Every structure is written in C-alpha cells, then in structure tokens.
Amino acid sequence: MLLGLVLFYVGAVLILNGLWMLERISDWEIWVINLFVGVISLLASFRQAFGADADAASVKAAALSLLFSLTYLWLAANRFSDVDGRGLGWFSLFVAITALPVAADILRGAQNTGDVWLGLSWAAWAVLWLLFFLQLVLRQPVTRI
C-alpha cells in the first residue's frame, strides 16, 4: 500500500522535475514537490524498515526507497543554497550504479508483468540518475534528453 502511494508521487515529481529542467517551472517552485515527495518516501521507508512487521526484505526495500528520498530532499535543499549541485550529481552516480543490479535482479526473477514493469522501471531510473550525474558533474547538456 505504501509503495503505491510513494510511486504515485515519484511519478509526479519526475514529470515536474523534467519540466523544471526545461525551465517551465522556476527554481523557487520546484522545491515544494521535491520536499513533499522526499518526506513522504522518507516516512514510508522508515515505517517499512522499523515497523513491527519489518523483516530483511522490507529493510532492503526501505533502503532502496531511501535512494529516492535523499535525491528529492537534496534537490529541494539545493534550491535554497548557493551550490552547483555536484554533490547531488556524485550521489546520483552512486544511485545509478546501485539501481542497475537491482533492475537485473528483479528482471531475472520476474514471474509476472508487474515484476517486469518494476525491473524496467529500475533500469529507467538508473538512466535518469546517470543523466543527472552527467548534467551536474560533467556539465553535459542532457536537458532535452
């Protein structure tokens, strides 16, 4: 249930961040959705990792969800500070590298269409995080991609 809630807002924040990168949303507005999604995913992850029914699988899922939480919270924080974003870019490279084996593992064990969708989603997220690294650290013009 919590995963669906978080993924719904992750979809919204990805679209809005894309619009922001295309300069259709201002820096002073984009922090709102990033902070909101960061907090929601943080709370859901903490519930998943530290709830009464927490087990190894839920802690692993929470750890992966926290990759999203920190990304969105960091992006929101960067809108208030005078930084160039390289720290977030390097973190994004770490996340992209982390997401690839997650995608492969899910796809390798896929038993239904939902599993395939989740594995492909992780692969797509890895690409998005890699693009963030390319833009923030290597200063590559990837906005249109």
Image: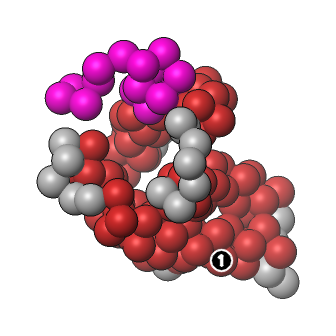
In the image, residue 125 lies at what x, y percent? Answer: 43, 38
The structure residue drawn at horizontal position 42% and vertical position 46%, both measured from the top left corner, is: 118
How dense is the environment of label 1, judged by Cα within 10 Å: few (below 14), some, or many (20 and up)? some
The structure residue drawn at horizontal position 32% and vertical position 68%, both measured from the top left corner, is: 29
Say whether residue 127 is left or right of residue 57: left
Would you say residue 68 is visible in this rendering?
no
Say whether residue 26 is left or right of residue 104: left
Tell me the quarter of the picture where residue 48 sits: bottom right
In the image, residue 34 lies at what x, y percent? Answer: 45, 64
Q: Which residues are magenta?
A: 131-145
Compared with 127, 8 (above or below) is below
Compared with 87, 17 (above or below) is below
Q: Which residue is mark 1?
A: 43
Secondary structure of the residue carrying numbered label 1: helix
At label 1, the amino acid type is: Leu
The structure residue drawn at horizontal position 78% and vertical position 68%, both measured from the top left corner, is: 49
Say whether residue 115 is left or right of residue 61: left
Is 135 magenta? The answer is: yes
Nearer the observer, 112 or 124: 124
In the image, residue 56 lies at what x, y percent? Answer: 82, 57
Would you say residue 23 is visible in this rendering?
yes
Magenta highlight: main SS: loop
Could you tell me which quadrant the C terminus lies in? top left
